[in-house]
Amino acid sequence: MQRFLSGFSLYCSRRPSLRSLVLAVSLLAAAAAAPAQNLPPAVVGALRVAQIPQQNTGVLVLDADSGKRVLVANNLAQPFNPASVMKLVTTDAALELLGPTYSWKTQAYVDGALDQGVLDGDLIIKGGGDPKMVMENFWLFLRQLRARGVKDIRGNLVIDRSFFAGAPYDPAQFDGDPQKPYNVGPDALLLNYKTLAFRFEPNAAAGTVAVTMEPPLAGYAITPPRLSQEPCGDWQGKLMLANDAASATFSGTYPADCGSRVWYVHPYRMGSVQYAGAMFAQMWADLGGGFSGRVVSGAVTPSARLLAEAQSPALPEVIRDINKYSNNVMARQVLLTLAAETSGQPGDMVNGARAVRSWLNDKGLDTSGLAIENGAGLSRVERVTPALLGGMLAQAYRSPLMPEFVSSLPLVGYDGTMRRRLKTQSVAGQAHIKTGTLNDVRSIAGYVQAASGKYYVVVFLINHPNAPSGQKAQDALLQWVYENG
């Protein structure tokens, strides 16, 4: 209780609104009066086995219908690194601020004369921040251009990325592994998550390995590995990949024992404009088009005219991909979109964080313990309190947009990042839970429908070097809520 009072004193010192003050008092009073605010014995036991002190955990179990009745509370006002659970904050804010019918637009403009299939001028592609412009959708977009009479482009391909503010991005900053797809940076024209999928097919009879790549990139050379008879083991390490802006060289070996495998790689030495240009050039040629110009960064000119437009799936479908599969770059795209749409300026992380904080403040939630760096949770500095996260989830449950939001979370024991957890327990299929994982972080948050039929908000954040061993404690809490809620 002393921790609650300390947090409440800090809250008051920041002069919150009356509505926020009333909400804080209500939550603290509910936690103080709740008959079962201590951690359940099964959870305490699992934490003890994992050697994780309770002071390194933040827990809240809250009746979703009322948003007031607290079953379990621990360190409500303490800020924790939530890892990917931060995506819940970003996506809930997007649903309310952008609306459930929001979609992103990618546009193609021509600047020059178009006569009998020949464009004597530039083709300009303006990115609108679409988080899901995968290769199939980009191909359909280019098909629109062919259907509108464009065949040979005699000018340049101009890539307009001005929807997002230009900012330096270091893919190695987080963990020193820039090739990992989760380290891809956001971009106003993000194509296929700026990732390459290398497929390896061993041919034992010929003693060779065939390597194919998606998406295909014009001018991108691949040197395949040698076939070996080693055990599969660390097959990616054995490949000894060296990639630059124009090629991928596998100077190592690929074990025949591995069979067919796919490796997803971020070509971090290739700039976004170069990646988009190479993808365009290959697909455009495959569609029978000609292109003799250069690929350059620029902007839509006043004389340009709109020729084609592609729309992304609606926001609810996008946030399902973000939350169920914890897609980091898509979450970054959403935060920058919030910034662009609410500030009227090119989207940047500062304005995105400001938009989310303002939205939470308007709900009467205390944001004094909130820190947003990129909205994806792939961060060492992002923080949220169990009280803030639980309060937000309780309000989301009572929102008209609740079905879209809840369905975006992984279903325990069935899909997303929760598909392998609690499969044999009775809570399987009865909870929608987002997970978060970093080296010293294990987090869960979402909703459980108890055996009684009642719904509960559940938040369980662990920040400790032994956090990887804390999963059993979190699973025990989910099962406890199902049985006792």
Image (cartoon, grey):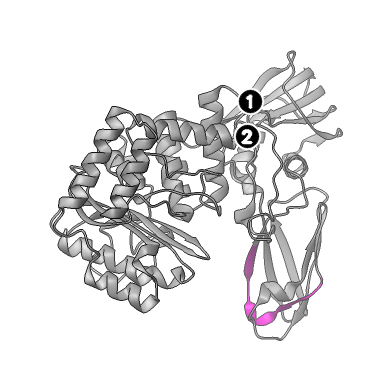
The answer to whether 322 appears left or right of 159 in the picture is: left
Q: Quadrant of the N terminus?
A: bottom left
Q: Secondary structure at mark 1?
A: strand
Q: Residue 386 at what x, y percent from top left?
A: 35, 51
Place of residue 267 in the rendered image (x, y in percent of width and height, measured from the top left): 73, 54
- Residue under the point 35% across and 31% down: 16
Residue 308 is tagged as: 1
Q: Magenta residues, as a range?
A: 251-263
**Numbered label attached to residue 6:** none
Q: Secondary structure at mark 2?
A: helix
Picture layout, residue 125 above or below residue 112: below
Tell me: residue 463, above or below residue 106.
Answer: below
In the image, is residue 158 part of the stretch drawn in magenta? no
Q: Which sits in the foreground, 450 or 64?
A: 64
Name which residue lies at 80% across and 25% down: 122
Q: Which mark is first along the chain, 1 or 2? A: 2
Please check the rendered image and state whether residue 261 is part of the magenta-colored stretch, yes or no: yes
Residue in the picture at 72% in, 61% down: 212
| Label 2 Cα crowd, 10 Å radius (few <14 / some 14-19 / many 20+) | some
What residue sits right under mark 2 in the picture? 141
